[in-house]
Amino acid sequence: MIPKGSIIVTLGEIIEPSKERTDPNKMDYPVYVGLEHIEKGTGKLLSFGDSSQIKSTKSNFYTGDLLYGKLRPNLNKVWLADRNGICSTDILVFPHGDRLSNKFLFYRLLSHDFVKYASQNASGVELPRVSYKNIAKFPIILPPLPEQHRIVAKIEELFTQLDAGVAALTTALAQLEYYRKSILKAAVEGCLTEEWRRSHGTTESANALLNSVLKRKYDSWQRDQFNKFIKKGIRPKDERWKLKYQSPQSPEIVNYPDLPKGWTWVSWDQIGYSQNGRSFPSKEYQSNGIKLLRPGNLYKNGSVSWNEDNTRYLPEIYAKESPEYIIKSNEIVMNLTAQSLKDEFLGRVCLTSEGEYCLLNQRIARLTPLDVSKRYLFWLFKSNIFRTFVNGLNTGSLIQHMFTSQLKEFILPLPPLAEQHAIVNEIERRFTIIDETEKTIQQSLAQAERLRQSILKRAFEGKLVPQDPRDEPASLLLERIKKEKAAAKTQKKTTRSGKSKTTQQGLI
Amino acid sequence: MANGGLVQKLWNYCNVLRDDGVSYGDYVEQLTYLLFLKMADELCRPPFNRPVIIPAECDWNALRNKDGSELETQYRKTLDNLGKKSGMLGVIFRKSQNKIQDPAKLRRLIELINDETWVGLDVDVKGEIYEGLLQKNAEDIKSGAGQYFTPRPLIKAMVEVMRPQPEQTIADPACGTGGFFLSEHDYIFKNYQLDRDQKEFLKSRTFKGWEIVDSAARLCVMNLYLHGIENEESPVIVGDSLLSQPSEHFDMVLTNPPFGKKSSITIMNGDGKASKESLTYERPDFWATTSNKQLNFLQHVKSMLKIEGHAAIVVPDNVLFEGGAGETIRKSLLHECDVHTLLRLPTGIFYAQGVKANVLFFDRKAASKEPWTKNLWIYDLRTNQHFTLKTNTLQFEDLKDFIRCYNPENRNVREESERFKCYTYDDLMQRDKVNLDIFWLKDESLEDSENLPDPDVIAQEIAENLEVALEQFSLVYEGLKGE
């Protein structure tokens, strides 16, 4: 069902590529366009090349010409020239004229159905190319020339609006990441729980918590020492061995920002233990058994991820031999080695999920807090406070390492236990909203791309703009084109002269 | 101060009526009618002794001694009758209705108004009360009245750089509640020593406005009237200014056309659709036909200017980047006019959601082969600026640097600065689709910097971007639906 005034033609009936070649030694055009300069599927030019570097024969193009890359047509490289230049011979140049709107054809070639057709009709395996002969057979609905212009204007109006919407969504997506960071910062500074503190009055202060934790550490050390004596068969005569205890260093709080009421600065050494992983032999890797936790399993979003590509298994016997290296549910694990400071990979923390069961490989540490909320610490390690600490550790070396000895000295803000839980709740509440928003935006972005193609489809079915019965029918247009082609064949071939940029406006 | 007390009284009464279900918008309307009747009454007595314009059976006297259902009936009759008159009277009372259900409260309001002498009151006071109510009304987001209200600091800044002069004609094809007119009036009054003829000109022949919605036009006329600007004919025409080619041309046009595709017809005028607006206008003086309302206003403004006339128009980003008709219009504008300044406005200053706006300044020129625009100076007041409608509102001070950079005394002598850059005609024409949505400053909310903004600042930015996205996709949807 084609609209009134339009006709169906094949591309070959209306366009033919220019045969104008050029000797680059005689070139005075500064611009060279190769396939690498055209963005796939968008019709945009990414950059230019310098034609003085080009030695082999190329094709000429002029402002207003339509360029189509025939190599790898699935990449859909199309461009409407806004200046004169030369291009690769793998690019077909369709000259501009006033019989057809090259802009109309430009959008036509960007449409999905043409891309599919060209890709299916390409030949060659390593370097698939579609020939003009094949492209020429592609049928399209050709509207009257004024309608072509109207269609182009409408497409551009809708596309610029669409682009603006996509840009806004993309910006919002990027801002969500900063929003997360900002929330974490506010969380560990106590800003998220201001209201909570007001309504909950005094709870056990962090200092009290700290003292009980320090005592537990001391007791724990004593027990360990005692067990060691027993193993060796020693019975201590007095208590003096207890003096050997090196209590965790109290952090030196100089120039640290003030903390909210009830909070205190502590060092990691004071409130938790770090355990390094073991080096397990990679030649023992097999296709089943117990999973081995490696840096590649620690995802940016804080969860541990296992898939076919990133999972290695070890024989079960290693679990039996090294039970102290088994990682289970709800444990904090941290990556200690990275190639750079990028992506916050160095010092990246994850919290294992319910039912986790794997071995702790070298270069990863297990962090165990005493009486402090694990989730609070998890979020703390994801916040800017820890990030700043990590970034400041090693400078200059190529591969970044973090040592558990360095980790001991990390100073962090500790709220009272009840407030820790409140903070975690606040963070997680907001983060779930952000996650939802992120999903919605990504979905909308995907839909926007389909919308683009949908608009083109509508346009080329002739349903985007109304027909105008006063337009000269396309059949007459086609006749004129045919006459011109016939006339041109009998004439001697002459080089087209370059046209300046300003005439481009009149033709499009 | 006695005047302060009056303002307070009227505010308080507004709140009393609010609890009765009378919105700010309704209150302002009723106040308009009653105040006008009272002032007309004062004017026909000594010492003014002006000719009577209101028939005795609908004047103030007939109203103020009644109460109960008698009062209700009289009031209704009055409104009805006066709504049929021509000129300013007609504009103020057209389709007017009583919204105060309780006649005792109506009576109380009448008494309040009766106790004061209004005509003698300082113009500024009256203006302040009225403007204050209009502002409050605009803040009531649900009512949608905000779209008729341009932030006053912005208007003031625009007037400061445009510098209207005595005996110039000034128009606004989308005048809303008349904010631009008042500011222009003030500016001329304060900066010049006007002789009697000039004063007369300022009062009755300077300003001309169009407003499509009855209730807004009503408030505009009343607003002007309270500020001493009046004309028997009414300086404001109620209707769609885009319908036809301008028959008059003006020295100056300052305007903020409504955002969005259609006006929100549900504000204040409980009438439902007051008029059927078309979206596309076929006009011989237009460069392109489009359903984009703001692009149409842009074309219309240029058309209503005298040659060498000056314009300042608030436009959303779409006017600067939309392809198709937008590109054609921008090209023509740059050619036929001297488009010399663009002010990128911050977000969070208008009552409309999802709008990023700018002020475009241009002069209309005589026909010429060569393009008139040589340089476009752009001031970026948007990047890294965060305003809100309640807690961090835009102040005149925030626009002072722009005014300084603009250099109204001589705009041919300007200097670039961090926020002020110059683009040549060639620079502009080379941009894809002549896109004038230009910026160069880095957005802090996207920078990996030490200075992470507060969560609520970023949240606001995200919300704004989502609103912009929503607005754009709605436009695409509308654009596809329409054909």
Image (tube, rainbow, N blue to C red):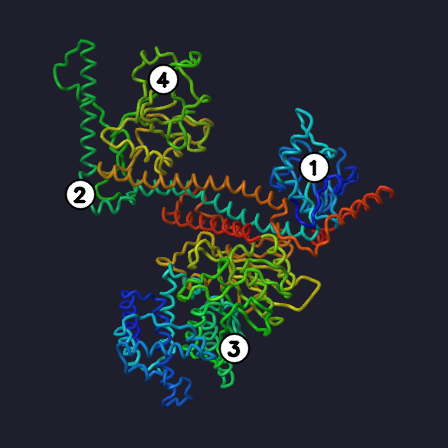
Disc 3 marks a residue whose amino acid type is: Thr
Task: Return the residue at label 2.
Answer: A202
Residue A166: x %, y % from top left: 51, 45
* Discs 2, 4: same chain: yes
Which of marks 4 and 2 precedes in the sequence?
2
Which of marks 2 and 1 precedes in the sequence?
1
Disc 4 marks a residue whose amino acid type is: Arg
Tell me the quadrant of the picture where the N terminus of chain B can be found: bottom left
Report crowding for label 1: few under 14, some 14 to 19, many 20 or more residues within 10 A (C-alpha): some
Q: Which mark is residue B206?
A: 3
Q: Return the residue nearer the eye: B389 or B32.
A: B32
Q: Return the residue nearer the eye: A358 or A235.
A: A358
Instruction: Return the chain for callout 3.
Output: B
Q: Return the residue nearer the eye: B281 or A322.
A: B281
Q: Return the residue nearer the eye: B479 or A304.
A: B479
Up/down of A87 relative to A477, above or below: above
